Each structure stands twice: as structure tokens, then as C-alpha cells.
């Protein structure tokens, strides 16, 4: 006897379109708070509309785009049930990549893949994305929530983002402006930011309960490991764009992300210039296990994880930002003006090195 055909709805297959609609409704206010005058319409269209009329006033407008994700930091967010700030991490990774060219972020789109959509859960995630867009000055103009039953566990999710910005070619920053003798300034990071989390999980998270992770630690200045590793990535783009608009004479910048200082600062150098970075500790010691590995303030969590992994200094500087979220290169005579312009926008700086004749690499002293 053959089985009788039966009705199977999309919800029976694991996709709840009604909950998806509720999720869209839950994020509308957060998205609306990021709007710019150039945004045309709102959520709900098949494509997002953004006026390019302002570009007509530029001599040679260049669109600058970037895309990125948050990576395995999301696994820790899921373990701790903390989803409010990973959206800020997502925006930071994208907008701070394009601002190094001097580009103002204009609009942002996100992609959320999740095992099972829950409106409140999604509102927390996208609310963080909206907050990141607000901090950086770009509009959240659209995105996608994709439910993947059978492919992802119900509570698993992944994030990706895409940003478009613009810079007038005569004002574009980059390695072409860097000269021998230039000064390298650092802007502090808030912590590990969003890179190196596969190592963080392996040496500091795995095997610990949520309760253990939320206990204060003397090694972290009384902060819990949960708080330290989940602190959101600092978003620099908005403040930097305002400093540039005020006339800050910056030559180039490097966003210190995956690969650390060693493999990011070199991307701001021409082929005939090296960056010499001082990494001796304040007391002159190079013993990474018991002394800061830089003459600037390094978030304790970076040293904590580096020691747990028994990293050498070279390995640490190729893995973590070591307390530097963004490096800024300028002429020595302009260093004070650049530092003052950034400070006026809430970004303190410190001197971390200088540019010398070389081969386009980062060297340490």
C-alpha cells in the first residue's frame, strides 16, 4: 500500500516566514536611526537606493568598498549568550578597512545566516550592526536574514558585512604619500578586537564553564575573561573622517587586524620604506611572560592569552594588535597637529615608530 501524500509547509521544513517578518519589524527602528540624507526609501525594497548627487562636487570621486565577517568570536558569543555587540565588530572590520584610504563610509549591508530565526535574538544582533553604523556615520540600507535548517544548528549563526565609501582622488591616502622620516602614531585598541579568536578559544575558553568565564580575574585587573574577550572592536572611521575634514595632514593608515602589526602596517608602506616599531617594555625588559611587550598600554587580555599560548614576541605581534587598533603615518613636523586633531575627536595617540629606508617591511627595535 502506498503512502498517501501529505501537506508539508515551509515551516514544517524548518523555515518560519512569519518569524522572519517579525524579525524585520523588530529591527526597523534600529535601522532607521542610521539613515543619512542620501538614503532613498527604506527597508523592504528589492534593492537599496542611495543618492550619489553629493559626489558631483568632488574632482574625481573614487568608490571604496570592503567586506568582512566576525569569525570565530561568534562561537564565544553563542557560548556566553551575548549577541548585542558582535554587530559592532562586524561594522568595525569593514568601515575601518576602507577609512585607511581616507574614504568616508556611506552605506552598509549585512548578511546573517542562522539555523533558526528568533525575532528577539535577531533584533539584538542587528541592533549591534545599527549601532556600529551610527558610530561610523554610514547608513544601514539593507541586508539578508537567511534561515538554514538542517545546515546549521538552531542557535548557530554567522555574520558578513559589506560597506561602500567614497574619497576624492586628490585627498586619497596611502603608501604613495609615505616618506623616509615619517612618524608612526598608534591609536589604542579596546582589546583583542575581532582577530585571533581561534587561538583565544583554544587556550583560554575551551574546557571552562560560562560561570568560570564570568569570574573576575586579578590578571585582567578584576575584569572577567568573558567581558575582556567580548569587548566590541573600536570603530575609528567616524572620528578619523571628522579629523581629516578638519585638516589633519595624514599620509597613510593601517588597520591592525588579522596578522597583527607585522602583517598590516607593512600594507601602508611603499616598497622602499620600512616601519621601525619600538616594542621594548617600559622597564627595558623583553621578557614577554612577565612584562608588557610594548611601551604603550596593552590591554591585559592580550598578554593573558599570549602567555597562555606561550607565544614568542614575534608570534604575538603577528597574531594580535598588541594594543594598537590603527596606525597613522604622517610627516614629523605634522605629528602634533595630527595627534591634536584625532584627540579632538576622542582618539588618543602615542608614538610607536618611524619610517626609514628599506624594503617595505616592519622591523622591531
Image (cartoon, helix red, strand yellow):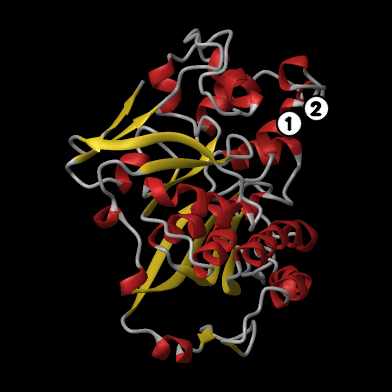
In what element is the residue under mark 1? Answer: helix
Q: Is residue 274 left or right of residue 82?
A: left
Q: Residues within 10 Å of mark 1 (few under 14, many from 20)?
A: many
Q: Residues within 10 Å of mark 2 (few under 14, many from 20)?
A: some
Q: Is residue 253 left or right of residue 46?
A: left
In x, y percent, where is residue 309?
52, 15
Quarter of the picture containing the C terminus is: top left
Quarter of the picture containing the N terminus is: bottom right
State the image quarter where residue 15 is shown: bottom right
Q: How many numbered dots are placed on residues in this image?
A: 2
Image point (53%, 83%), residue name:
48
Q: Is residue 360 left or right of residue 346?
A: left
In x, y percent, where is residue 186?
50, 40
Q: Is residue 353 left or right of residue 359?
A: right
**In the rendered structure, are the residues bearing label 1 and label 2 in contact, judged by CB atoms less than 8 Å apart?**
yes
Q: Which circle's residue, 1 or 2, is located before the other in the chain?
A: 2
- As drawn, the label of residue 157 is none
Q: Nearer the viewer, residue 151 or 82?
A: 82
Residue under pointer 2: 214
Image point (54%, 62%), residue name:
243
Is residue 218 something that shows in the picture?
yes
In x, y percent, where is residue 210?
78, 27
Image point (63%, 58%), residue name:
345
- As drawn, the label of residue 226 is 1
Is residue 2 something that shows in the picture?
no
Q: Nearer the viewer, residue 257 or 160?
A: 257
Q: Is residue 110 above or below residue 330?
A: below
In what element is the residue under mark 2? Answer: loop
Q: Is residue 232 above or below residue 164?
A: above
Amino acid at each position: 500500500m502506498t503512502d498517501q501524500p501529505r501537506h508539508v509547509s515551509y515551516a514544517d521544513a524548518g523555515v518560519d516566514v512569519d518569524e522572519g517578518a517579525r524579525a524585520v519589524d523588530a529591527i526597523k527602528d534600529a535601522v532607521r536611526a542610521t539613515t543619512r540624507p542620501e538614503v532613498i526609501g527604506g527597508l523592504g525594497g528589492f534593492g537599496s537606493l542611495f543618492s550619489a548627487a553629493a559626489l558631483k562636487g568632488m574632482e574625481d570621486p573614487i568608490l571604496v568598498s570592503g567586506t568582512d565577517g566576525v569569525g570565530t568570536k561568534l562561537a564565544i558569543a553563542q557560548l556566553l549568550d551575548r549577541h548585542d555587540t558582535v554587530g559592532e565588530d562586524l561594522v568595525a572590520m569593514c568601515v575601518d578597512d576602507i577609512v585607511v584610504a581616507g574614504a568616508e563610509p556611506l552605506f552598509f549591508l549585512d548578511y546573517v545566516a542562522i539555523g533558526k530565526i528568533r525575532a528577539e535574538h535577531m533584533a539584538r544582533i542587528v541592533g549591534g550592526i545599527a549601532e556600529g553604523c551610527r558610530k561610523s556615520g554610514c547608513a544601514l540600507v539593507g541586508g539578508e536574514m537567511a534561515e538554514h535548517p538542517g545546515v546549521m544548528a538552531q542557535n548557530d549563526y554567522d555574520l558578513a558585512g559589506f560597506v561602500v565609501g567614497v574619497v576624492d582622488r586628490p585627498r586619497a591616502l596611502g603608501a604613495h604619500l609615505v616618506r623616509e622620516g615619517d612618524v608612526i602614531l598608534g591609536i589604542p585598541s579596546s582589546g583583542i578586537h575581532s582577530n585571533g579568536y581561534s587561538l583565544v578559544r583554544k587556550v583560554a575558553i575551551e574546557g571552562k564553564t560560562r560561570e568560570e568565564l564570568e569570574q573576575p580575574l586579578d590578571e585582567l585587573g578584576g575584569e572577567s575573561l568573558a567581558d575582556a574577550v567580548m569587548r566590541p572592536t573600536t570603530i575609528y572611521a567616524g572620528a578619523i573622517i571628522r579629523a581629516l575634514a578638519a585638516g589633519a595632514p595624514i599620509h597613510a593608515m593601517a588597520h591592525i587586524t588579522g596578522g597583527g602589526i607585522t602583517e598590516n602596517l607593512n600594507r601602508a608602506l611603499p616598497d622602499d620604506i620600512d616601519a621601525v616599531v619600538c616594542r621594548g617594555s617600559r622597564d627595558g625588559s623583553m621578557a614577554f611572560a612577565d612584562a608588557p611587550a610594548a611601551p604603550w598600554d596593552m590591554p591585559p587580555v592580550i598578554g593573558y592569552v599570549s602567555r597562555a599560548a606561550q607565544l614568542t614576541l614575534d608570534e604575538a605581534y603577528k597574531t594580535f594588535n598588541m594594543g594598537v587598533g590603527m596606525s597613522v603615518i604622517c610627516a614629523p613636523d605634522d605629528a602634533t597637529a595630527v595627534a591634536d586633531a584625532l584627540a579632538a575627536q576622542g582618539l588618543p595617540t602615542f608614538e610607536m615608530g618611524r619610517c626609514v629606508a628599506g624594503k617595505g617591511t616592519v622591523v622591531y627595535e
